Amino acid sequence: MSQVFQNTTTVLPVSSTFKDAVELITQTQPQLNIIEQYWASWYHYMQNDILATGLLFFVLHEVMYFGRCLPWFIIDKIPFFRKWKIQPTKIPSDKEQWECFKSVLLQHFLVEAIPIWTFHPMCEKLGISIQVPFPHYLTMLRQITIFFVLEDMWHYWAHRLFHYGVFYKYIHKQHHRYAAPFGLTAEYAHPVEVLSLGVGTVGMPIAWVYFTGDLHLFTLCCWITLRLFQAVDSHSGYDFPWSLNKFIPFWAGAEHHDLHHHYFIGNYASSFRWWDYTLDTESGGEAKVSREEKMKKKAEKKAK
Ligand SMILES: [Zn+2]
Ligand SMILES: [Zn+2]
């Protein structure tokens, strides 16, 4: 029996198809909203929470990642959008995209086979809830905002470390194969890098629930989806007048990360600009000029 219902006395007949499960839950649980009903139907239909959570995460990752890459693949084919391409002369070829797609897909299957079986038991141990109804949307929003800030901090320092000598040579170099990135390259990286940077995405929510005891699996699904979108978009290679960084000035976006791939140095953070700005690691020509000016002023002051 699934743990998806808070009331353990809720005993429902087993459904032989997912459609039957949806019908049953819709009729017996009308107080739930439609997403909660589908969520409960999935767990009820599976009758195996470990597999239900594992498969849910695997499918979520594949659909959201490749689904988000698809519009960028199409945009690369349409010359109209070229005026917003950050490195306009570097359009990825079909061969490059295909090679990258195959490599990322293979890695997903190899690296994610283990978490599929271990994720649910870990959730249970940590107290991550799978029950319906979901938490209030403001609680979810608050937690997701915190995860964005924490992941960005982790990403900044881990990524900066990956640019040192041996770490770069043996691990991070793979991700820098494309000096002009495209959506699919977001997860094109050495498995060690995928796991280390994944700590920021999955490890931070785990640390959060360890200290607060308050996290729902649906919140985690929403966070991972948004984080995947952020990663794919920052590798898209396009900076539009309607891109998020034009409305939220501290949002990094593609413009920030594209410069990192172009110059191989600076702009180490993932979602926000504050770490690179404060610690003077911004990338690109403009940042270099301002850094040199600062150093010159400092030296002049010292000489006086
Ligand atoms: Zn890098
Ligand atoms: Zn990158």
Image (cartoon, rainbow, N blue to C red):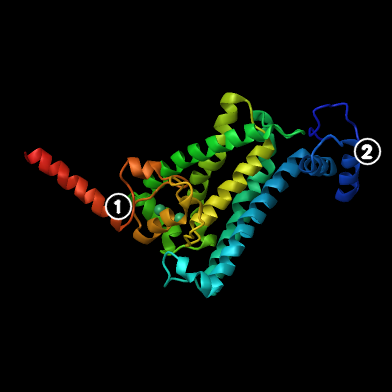
| Nearest-to-viewer mark from 2 and 1 | 1
Q: Which amino acid type corresponds to the residue marked 1 in the rendered image?
A: Ala
Mark drawn on residue 223 = none
Q: Is residue 11 left or right of residue 74?
A: right
Instruction: Look at the numbered disc 1 and give the secondary structure of its residue.
Output: helix
Relative side of 185 to 289, left or right: right
| Residue in view at x 88 percent, y 44 percent | 21
Distance between the alpha carbons at the discs numbered 2 and 1: 64 Å
User: Which corner quadrant of the image does residue 262 belong to?
Assistant: bottom left
Quadrant of the image containing the C terminus: top left
Residue lying at 34% horizontally and 59% vertically, measured from the top left: 263
Graded by Cα atoms within 10 Å as few (under 14), some (14 to 19) or many (20 or more), the crowding at tag 2 reads few
Residue tagged 2: 13
**Identity, as a three-letter code, of the amino acid under mark 2:** Pro
Q: Nearer the viewer, residue 216 or 122?
A: 216
The picture places residue 65, in percent across and down from the top left corner, at: 61, 55
Residue 161 pos. (x, y %): 37, 45
Residue under the image location 54 percent in, 68 percent down: 97
* Residue 179 drawn above or below residue 134: below
Residue 57, position as x, y percentages in the image: 67, 46
Graded by Cα atoms within 10 Å as few (under 14), some (14 to 19) or many (20 or more), the crowding at tag 1 reads some
Q: Quadrant of residue 53?
A: top right
Quarter of the rendering occupied by the N terminus: top right
The first of marks 2 and 1 along the sequence is 2
Q: Give the side of residue 277 with respect to residue 298, left or right.
A: right
The answer to whether residue 2 is above or below residue 108 is above
Q: Is mark 1 within 8 Å of ligand 1?
A: no
Quadrant of the displayed image that contains ligand 2? bottom left
Along the line of sight, which residue is nearer the eye, 133 or 261?
133
Q: Is residue 83 above or below residue 129?
A: below
Judging by the rendered image, the residue that carries numbered circle 1 is 287
